[in-house]
Image: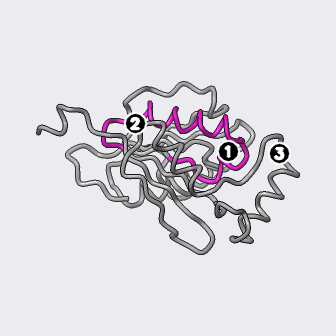
């Protein structure tokens, strides 16, 4: 994602794993910075990947649960939930969506990348198998339908909700935090 704003974008990557989303944003935007989060046992993978790309000076690492770490309100242009919601169940996923909304500046975007299923849960065999894996290996894991995620984003206050499929079987939902009244009159 490229930004042409006067200030460089600031991204928050929750449950970043190896931080591929944050690294992509930093690579695409010379002045961008990122806050990268994951559990203390995982965040060293992100540290190594960021260091390998010589991006360490532009990244702040915040180890801990994405449900509990401190996140500044109205501070980010982009919040990424990349392949983490399927481990959390509905209630905790909705909580993460609310956290993302609060963390975004007006006009900011959330990205939710994962494998989603159709409403009848009969197509998208890859996503269905991922759901079985999540149910077998996590406490709350499941796959969600496109309609569920889109409605949760709208209920949280996001607008211009859309989905894209950048590579096969993966969908990325994008939602925008509405601009403030002052922003829309400029």
Q: Which residue is mark 2?
A: 104
Say which mark, if any, is on residue 138: 3
Q: Residue at x 83, y 50 (%)?
A: 135
Q: Nearer the viewer, mark 2 or mark 1?
A: 2
Image position, residue 153 (x, y; %): 49, 44
- Residue 83 visible? The answer is yes
The segment highlighted magenta reads: 80-108
Element type where label 1 sits in the image: helix
Q: Residue at x 60, y 66 (%)?
A: 170
Crowd class of label 1 (few under 14; some 14 to 19; many from 20; radius 10 Å): some
Image position, residue 73 (x, y; %): 42, 26
**Residue ranking furthest to the front:** 120
Distance from label 2 to label 1 (Cα)? 26 Å
- Residue 115 visible? The answer is no
Q: Is residue 11 left or right of residue 106?
A: right
Element type where label 3 sits in the image: loop
Distance from label 3 to label 1 (Cα)? 22 Å
């Amino acid at each position: 994602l490229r930004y042409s704003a006067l200030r460089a974008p600031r991204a928050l990557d929750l449950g970043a794993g190896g931080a591929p989303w944050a690294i992509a944003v930093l690579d695409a935007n010379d002045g961008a910075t990122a806050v990268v989060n994951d559990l203390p046992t995982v965040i060293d993978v992100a540290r190594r990947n960021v260091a390998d790309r010589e991006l360490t000076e532009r990244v702040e690492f915040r180890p801990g649960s994405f449900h509990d770490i401190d996140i500044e309100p109205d501070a980010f242009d982009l919040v990424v939930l990349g392949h983490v919601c399927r481990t959390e169940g509905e209630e905790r996923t909705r909580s993460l969506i609310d956290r993302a909304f609060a963390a975004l500046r007006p006009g900011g975007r959330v990205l939710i990348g994962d494998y989603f299923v159709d409403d009848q849960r009969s197509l998208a065999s890859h996503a269905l198998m991922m759901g079985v894996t999540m149910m077998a290996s996590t406490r709350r894991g499941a796959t969600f339908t496109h309609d569920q995620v889109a409605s949760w984003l709208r209920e949280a206050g996001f607008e211009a909700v859309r989905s894209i499929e950048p590579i096969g079987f993966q969908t990325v939902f994008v939602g925008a935090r509405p601009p403030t009244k002052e922003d829309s009159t400029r």
